[in-house]
Image (spheres, grey):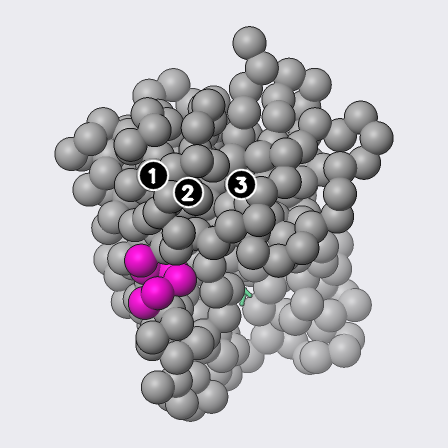
Amino acid sequence: MTARILITGAAGGVGTLMRPRLAAPDRVLRLLDIAEMPPAAPGERVELVTASVTDQAAMEAACEGVDAVIHLGGHSLERPWAQILDVNIDGTHTVLEAARRRGVGRVVLASSNHAVGFHPRSRGEAGDYLFPRPDSYYGVSKVAMEALGSMYSSRYGLDVIAVRIGSCFEKPRDTRMLSTWLSPDDGARLFEACLSAPSPGFRVVWGVSDNTRRWFSLDEARALGYAPEDDSEVFAAELIAEQGEPDPESLAHKHVGGLWCGPEFDTAV
Ligand code: 15L
């Protein structure tokens, strides 16, 4: 039987990178977003749904006949509290509740390093299940996402995996991302592991490539079956030539969340 995977926020950065990479002959990707998405290419097995993750009825309809949800939808940067509350926190509740009501057994949640952004880097590698220390309202929403995922797993038996994504872009954009980069191909490998691991229950894993300068543990992700193949080090010489050697005392490198821990992010209201 063909598997059907619902991807929320499919028009966003990570969604766009995952669309071609999660395609498979025996799979239909149901892509949901409020933003416009490129139409299906010839032979591409996708269904496009225009809806908001905050719309309960639309989310239930989108969950119909779905085997798993990858929830990427929501604001991906800092926003005023009301917007974070509505789209990221209430939206995640809406998605999980829709999955539960429609009998979807597995939900993969796009959490973020900003859920634990204020952890000082001086403590060494950030382990799995690090206690929340959000650096922003956005980070608070990722903590809430993990809490909601935990509750839906414990109370209703859903398999829920929260991925604390580092920085998922085509290439690392600065020297911090030499540590936090999740290559798009490794991102797809990690999501595949999240989709196929037998009965994972509730897990929190780091979403990062096997970077030489990695700050995050890969133990729990590997336990799910993730086998990363990429390392940001191939971009190191170029980035360091442009931006200088990373200074552990600088704002960008002092805490897990980098610049998000600085005054620039004090302004959200
Ligand atoms: C995130 O969670 C953001 O969505 C993304 O835009 C990056 O800022 C990333 O974290 C990061 O920390 O590099």
Foreground pick, 76 / 164 = 76
Q: Residues within 10 Å of mark 1 (few under 14, many from 20)?
A: many
Tell me the residue that label 1 is attached to. 98
Question: Marks 1 and 3, how far apart in space?
Answer: 13 Å
Q: Residue 233: tell me if it is visible.
A: no
Quarter of the figure that contains the C terminus: bottom left
Examine the structure image and report whether residue 92 is included in the region drawn in magenta: no
Mark 1 vs 2, N-terminal side = 2
Tell me the residue that label 2 is attached to. 59
Q: For the residue labelled by badge 3, is the local secondary structure a helix, a strand or a loop?
A: strand
Residue range (magenta): 85-90
Outermost residue, front direction?
Answer: 57
Residue occupying image coordinates x 37% and y 69%: 84
Mainly helix, strand or loop, the magenta region?
Answer: helix
The answer to whether mark 1 is within 8 Å of ligand 1 is no
Tell me the residue that label 3 is attached to. 7
